[in-house]
Image (spheres, rainbow, N blue to C red):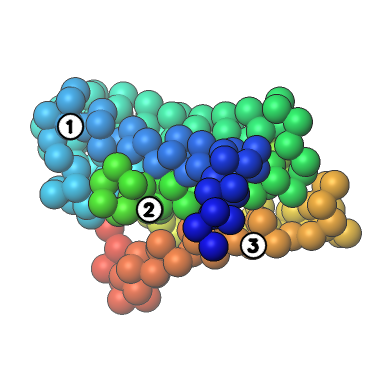
Amino acid sequence: MVSGILDFITSFNGALYIFAYLVGGIPFGYLLAKYIGKVDIKKAGSGNIGATNVLRVLKQKDEKLAKKLGAITLLLDALKGAIVVLVAKFLGANDFVVWSVGVFAVIGHCYTPFLKFEGGKGVATGFGVLMALIPIPTLIALIVWFIAAKTIKISSLSSLIALIAVIVSATILYPNGLPNIHTYTPLYVIAFIIFYKHIPNIKRLILKEEGKVV
């Protein structure tokens, strides 16, 4: 059994999955807030390491810096999702493996080994993966997100609406499953992880206690 695990870890696919998990686990929001904003966001606001909490927490100290670091966090979290799948494609991985790499990147962000397996919500990283693999449904979802964010001003709800939008768009545009793999399974897995991480937010939304980003 041990030799089988070692064989998998050292195999091409296993190495890609570990690479994706570790890159996905890089806590950019935590690092930027701690070393530039001088705040431990794990101990402030929602305790989340994503862009929204970076913005919310640092806004109390320096609004201009908060917006800058929030935007950088969002970009870097999305890029790490896109980069790992593009690297997998460049190295010749088959399409199912490429999608699996994307899933591992999202898992890495949500359960980062660098912060005792506590991480973010997976939205930016998930959408980075999806932008690299199914850009048209993702662009539609991002437009939906932008409209929702501007009108509702609740980050979690806007993200969940956008996630539903990408699923619906992908289903309509690819009625036989995702391109080249003919199944929606990886998309559903990514969506499930993101929804699962948002359960506390969903509870607060139901109780009308979820805060707005202003």
Q: Which residue is mark 3?
A: 188
Question: Can residue 133 be seen in this snapshot?
Answer: yes
Which of discs 1 and 2 lies nearer the camera? The answer is: 2
81 horizontally vs 95: left or right: left
Question: Which residue is pictured at 71% across the width and 31% down the height?
Answer: 89
Type of amino acid at the residue the image marks with label 1? Lys
181 horizontally vs 51: left or right: right
Label 1: few (<14), some (14–19) or many (≥20) C-alpha neighbours in 10 Å: some
Element assignment for label 2 = loop
Label 3: few (<14), some (14–19) or many (≥20) C-alpha neighbours in 10 Å: few
Question: Which residue is pictured at 47% across the width and 52% down the height?
Answer: 107
123 horizontally vs 72: left or right: right
- Image quadrant in which the N terminus is located: bottom right
Label 1, label 3: how far apart the Cα atoms are: 33 Å
The image position of residue 193, as x and y in percent, is 50, 61
Type of amino acid at the residue the image marks with label 2? Tyr
161 horizontally vs 120: left or right: right
Q: Which residue is mark 1?
A: 34
Question: Which residue is pictured at 74% across the width and 54% down the height?
Answer: 169
Q: Which mark is residue 111?
A: 2
Q: Earlier in the sequence, mark 1 or mark 3?
A: 1
Label 1, label 2: how far apart the Cα atoms are: 19 Å
Label 2: few (<14), some (14–19) or many (≥20) C-alpha neighbours in 10 Å: many
